[in-house]
Amino acid sequence: MAFTFKTPSVAVPSKGRTGILLLNLGTPDDTGYFAVRRYLKEFLSDQRVIESPPLIWQPILQGIILTKRPFASGANYARIWDREENASPLRVFTRRQAEKLSARLEKDGIPVAWGMRYGQPSVKDALTSLMDQGCDRIISIPLYPQYAAATTATANDQLFRALMRLRRQPAVLTMPSFPDHPLFIKALQTSVRETLESLPFKPQQIVASFHGLPKTCIDKGDSYRDECVRTIVALRQALDLREEQMPLTFQSRFGPLEWIQPYTAPFVSALPAQGITKIAVIMPGFMTDCIETLDEIGNELREEFMAAGGEEFAIVPCLNDSEGAIDLLEELSRSALKGFQFS
Ligand SMILES: C=CC1=C(C)c2cc3[nH]c(cc4nc(cc5[nH]c(cc1n2)c(C)c5CCC(=O)O)C(CCC(=O)O)=C4C)c(C)c3C=C
Ligand SMILES: [Fe+2]
Ligand SMILES: [Fe+2]
C-alpha cells in the first residue's frame, strides 16, 4: 500500500503534545432519504456490525433494506431532530461533550477533537485537527461504556485505518470501556435521582434498556453482555435497588437472528398485566441521547406500554453533556495522560 506523508501545519513540539479524541458512532446529516441512505449504507456495510458474508448480505442491503428503510428511519429521525441546531441529537451532544471537556483541559494545553465512525466529522479529520495542533500523542476514547466489537472495536479500526496512511504516526492510546467506573455509576445515579425528583409520579420499576446484539456475537466471545451486567449490578447497588426493581433488558433488535434477551419491548408490554403501570426507563448503554433512546424508547415503547394498559411512562435522559458526564470524561483523560506523558 502507498504510505503518504503528513506534514502538520504546526510543528510538533519537541516535548510532544497529547490530544484527546472522542469517538462516537455517527448519524445522518439530515432526515432526507439520501442522507439517511448514505448513513445506513456505510453503517450496515461494516462487517463488525453485520458479520454475515458480504456475498450474502450486500444484495439484501442494497436491495430491500436501502430501498425501504431510509424512508421509515428518516421519518423517525425527523421526530427527534434538534431543530435549533439542525442536527441529530447524537451529533449535538457529542459536540457539546467535546466542547465542555476541552474547556476543562484547555489550561493544561490539551486539545480535544471528536470524530464519527460513520459520516461526519470523520475520524480522519478529527485526528488531523489534533495533529495540526502539534499532537504527536493521541488518547482515543470510544464513547461506549460497554465494549462491543460492533462499536468500540470498529471505532478503533477506523482510527487505525487513518493511521495506516501516515508516514509519521502519532503514538496512540485507546481507552478501555468503563462499564462500572465509579464516575460513570455516580453520573447515572445522579441522573436517576434528578429524574425521579422531577416526575409527578413514583415509578414502580425502573427498566434498564441496553442496545441489543446478535446472540452469536456473545457466543463468539464478545464481552458486551457481561459488561452490561457489570453496569447494572453497580447501578442497582448505588441506588440500593433490587433486581426486580431495576430489571435488565435489550432493545433495538435488527434482522431475523436471535439477539440477546430479554427483549425490552415484550418485557415492558407485559408489565401492566402484572400490575406495574408506572415505569421509568434508563438506557445506560448510551452516553448521548439518540434515535434509539428518544424515538425507539421515548416514542415507540411509550406507545406500546400505554396500549398494553400502562398509565405513566418516563425516560431517564442519557448523560449527554451533564456535569457528571464531563467529570467522567475528564477523569478518563487525566488518568490516561498520567500513563502516557512519561517524557
Ligand atoms: C446488526 C445491526 C446492529 C448492531 C449489531 C448494532 C450494535 C450496536 N449499536 C449501538 C448503538 C447505536 N445504534 C444506533 C442505531 C442503529 N443501530 C442499528 C443496527 C445495529 N446496531 C441500526 C440499523 C441503527 C439505525 C436505526 C435507524 O436508522 O433506524 C444508534 C443511534 C444512531 C443515531 O443516529 O441516533 C446508536 C447510538 C450499540 C451500543 C451497539 C452494540 C452494542
Ligand atoms: Fe445500533
Ligand atoms: Fe432502533
Image (cartoon, helix red, strand yellow):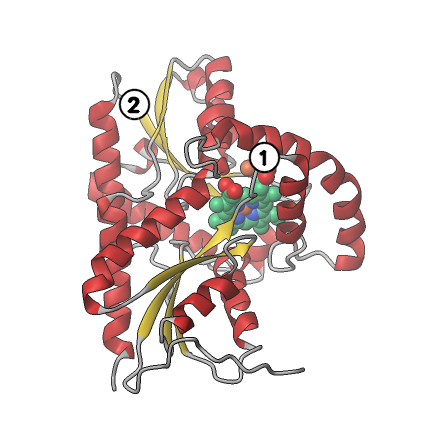
Query: Which residue is drawn at the image coordinates 56% and 52% (left, top)?
Result: 119
Query: Which residue is drawn at the image coordinates 41% and 32% (left, top)?
Result: 84
Question: Is 179 in front, or is 154?
Answer: 154
User: Does dot 1 land on a helix, a strand or a loop?
Assistant: loop
Q: Is residue 192 above or below residue 121?
A: above
Q: Which residue does the numbered mark 2 point to in the structure image?
A: 203
Query: Which residue is drawn at the image coordinates 58% and 56% (left, top)?
Result: 217
Query: Mark 1 near ligand 1 (CB under 8 Å)?
Result: no
Q: Image check: 156 left or right of 282?
A: right
Quadrant of the image containing the C terminus: bottom left
Question: Is 117 in front, or is 230?
Answer: 117
In terms of image quadrants, where is residue 49?
bottom right
Q: Residue furthest front?
A: 9
Question: Is 310 in front, or is 187?
Answer: 187
Q: Which residue does the numbered mark 1 point to in the structure image?
A: 31
Quadrant of the image containing the N terminus: bottom right
Provide residue 219's location: percent of width, then percent of height. 57, 58
Mark 1 or 2, closer to the camera: 1
Q: Image check: 117 left or right of 23?
A: right
Provide residue 196's location: percent of width, then percent of height. 24, 27
Provide residue 198's location: percent of width, then percent of height. 23, 24
Rounded to the nearest whole Å, what is the CA distance between mark 1 and mark 2? 34 Å
Number of numbered labels in the structure image: 2
**Quadrant in which ligand 1 is drawn:** top right
Using a 10 Å C-alpha cutoff, classify the residue at mark 2 as few (fewer than 14 neighbours), some (14 to 19) or many (20 or more): some
Which amino acid type is marked by label 2?
Pro
